[in-house]
Image: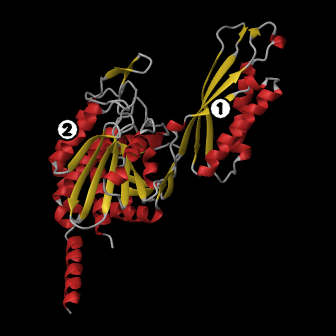
Amino acid sequence: MKRLSIISALMAASLTAQAAQPSPAQLAQSVEQALPKLEQLYLHLHQHPELSYHEQQTGQRMATELKRLGFEVTDNYGGYGVVAIFKNGQGPTVMVRADTDGLPITEQTGKDYASTVTTQDEDGNTVGVMHGCGHDIHMTSLIGSAEQLVKHKDQWQGTLMMVAQPAEEVGGGAKAMLKQGLFSQFPTPDHILGLHVSASLPAGQVGIAPGYALANVDSVDITVKGKGGHGAYPHTTIDPVVLASRIVLALQTIPSREVSPLAPNVVTVGSIHGGSKHNIISNEVKLQLTLRSYDPQVRLQQIAAIKRMVKGIGISAGLTESLLPTVYVHSDETIPSTYNDPTQTAEIRDSIRQAIGSDNVVKSEPVMAGEDFGLYGLTPEKRPITIFWLGAVEPTKYQRSVDSGKLLPSLHSSLFAPDYPDTISTGVKATTASVMDLFNAK
């Protein structure tokens, strides 16, 4: 009898905790009160971007903000990453991740808060630095969500894990944090959540794609060798420019004729360099490719087909073994596809609908962009992950684009300027509601 009483009391306490969750109106009001300070944080982060592997000051600011909220903070993790833990009784562990690095872009938005930061790239060139992919929004939303969850800590139980991850733009940050022991040194998450701004949705909206959301990404170099000579005597040479041209065209048959039309994939030659003068046939041409797919087997099929094709074209041109084209896959830059766990994603979608209204939550389609967020779902623990799109376009600009058909500035554009107040507010509400419901789910 005593045991039944204890169980009943625990069930009642659980129901009370769930019932005590803030209503959408209460959450909106709480976020609105916090917004001025969050906007200040956003402007600071936007004006002080740092490139991948150089996010030292950014990491320190994130660590300071999370310490202020009462988290146990470990900084300089996996580079300049930050892991913050807030233990709040017995319950699941929920991880929220934001990326922190900027891009080598000179901002041209014309905003009075535009980044004017410059730095030296690896080749010694002076380049501008900009948060052209919304990572400043991501970080601000993470801090805002952490603040709301701590403020309402009497309404959930469990362990909250906030991760500020460096080097997303080069595909190295998640790998480094996991390699250092993210899921062994700290609690292994039961749920993993992230967001990414969208340059094609209006601020105030959220887009969610169940299943595959983002693509496998591989960077591939092809070196095409030949036998150079005078442009007036091509018959005495084996022209690598012609061979490279044949390879570029042949590669397009991989998506169109080798991979199933039901398996989306992209093979893009983004760079071709060779030769030095009008009348000289060079000895070498270099190609740089990006490969995109969702299915890991399709990725392997693409790489195998490229190796087979370039070898065959080299042989057909009469090249000896030592001069055959070489294919190099940058394994350090490989990013797996991001697969949103359908069950968890459906739960998060429902939470966000409650928080910001059903009309503001849309089903998004998978994209061929890449994100190393997918790695968190591919560890041996196979924890469910969900990343959603956070609309960032000023609504009137969005509507003008719809009406006129004129394209909006994309992510990674020097003109990309999020409508940051509404975007941050929506990101905080969506994340807070989702995390709280994950804590309180049966």
Q: Nearer the viewer, residue 11 or 315?
A: 315
The disc, 2 or 1, on the residue closer to the chain's N-terminal end is 2
Q: Quadrant of residue 355?
A: bottom left
Where is the C terminus found, in terms of image quarters?
A: bottom left
Q: Position of residue 250 (x, y in %)?
A: 73, 34
- Provide the secondary structure element on which disc 1 rests: strand
Q: Is residue 382 left or right of residue 434?
A: right
- How far apart marks 2 and 1 lie (CA) works out to 47 Å
The mark lying in front, picked from 2 and 1, is 1
Mark linked to residue 387: none
- Vertical relation: 223 (above or below) 209: above
Q: Residue at x 52, y 40 (%)?
A: 334
Q: Residues within 10 Å of mark 1 (few under 14, many from 20)?
A: some
Residue at mark 2? 40
Residue at mark 1? 327
Q: Nearer the viewer, residue 133 or 399?
A: 133
Where is the N terminus found, in terms of image quarters?
A: bottom left
Q: Position of residue 76 (x, y in %)?
A: 29, 38
Q: Amino acid at mark 2?
A: Gln
- Provide the secondary structure element on which disc 2 rests: helix
Q: Amino acid at mark 1?
A: Val
Q: Position of residue 169 (x, y in %)?
A: 43, 36
Q: Is residue 16 left or right of residue 361?
A: left
- Vertical relation: 383 (above or below) 334: below
Q: Position of residue 379 (x, y in %)?
A: 45, 54
Q: Residue at x 31, y 30 (%)?
A: 49
Query: Is there CB contact under 8 Å for labels 2 and 1?
Result: no
- Vertical relation: 270 (above or below) 398: above
Q: Residue at x 20, y 50 (%)?
A: 72
- Direction right: furthest residue: 235
